[in-house]
Image (tube, helix red, strand yellow):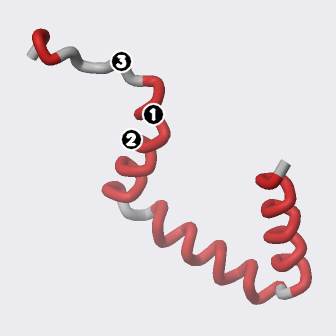
Amino acid sequence: MMRWLLLGALLGLLLLYPPLLAVVITVAAALLSKPLVVAFAAGLAARPYLPRIRSWAR
């Protein structure tokens, strides 16, 4: 529930201040253009779904 409230507040701010939308898009494009940042974010997102490595299997 809290996630939806935060998303609504963010969208409301972006609608009230259109230049802020341009800043957010610029920052997102700059971050997505860096492969290291994209790979790190993908690793963080996939971490809960990866199997655990057992100590005896190393």
Label drawn at residue 51: 3
Say what amino acid the circle numbered 1 marks: Ala
Instruction: Determine whether the residue tagged by mark 2 lies in a helix, strand or loop.
Output: helix
Q: Position of residue 15 (x, y in %)?
A: 89, 77
Q: In the displayed structure, would residue 26 be above or below residue 50?
A: below
Q: Nearer the viewer, mark 3 or mark 1?
A: 3
Q: Residues within 10 Å of mark 2 (few under 14, many from 20)?
A: few
Label 3 element class: loop
The residue depicted at 75 percent of the width and 78 percent of the height is: 21
Task: From the image, tell me which residue sits under label 1.
Answer: 46
Q: CA distance from mark 3 to mark 1?
A: 10 Å
The reply to whether dot 2 and dot 1 touch (C-beta < 8 Å) is yes
Residue mark closest to the camera, 2 vs 3: 3
Residue at 84 percent of width and 87 percent of height: 17
Q: Position of residue 4 (x, y in %)?
A: 84, 53
* Residue type (three-letter) at the residue carrying disc 2: Gly
Q: Position of residue 41 (x, y in %)?
A: 44, 50
The vertical placement of 24 against 50, above or below, is: below
Q: In the picture, which quadrant includes the C terminus?
A: top left
Q: Which residue is mark 2?
A: 43
Q: Secondary structure at mark 1?
A: helix
Q: Residues within 10 Å of mark 1 (few under 14, many from 20)?
A: few
The structure residue drawn at horizontal position 65% and vertical position 72%, both measured from the top left corner, is 25
- Per the model, the C-alpha gap separating discs 2 and 3 is 13 Å
Amino acid type at circle 3 is Pro
Q: Earlier in the sequence, mark 3 or mark 1?
A: 1
Count of marks overlaid on the render: 3
How far apart are the two marked residues, 2 and 1, measured between alpha carbons?
5 Å
Choose the circle earlier in sequence order: 2 or 3. 2
Q: Is 49 left or right of 34, judged from the image as shown?
A: right
- Provide residue 10's location: percent of width, then percent of height: 80, 70
Residue sitting nearer the eye, 17 or 57: 57
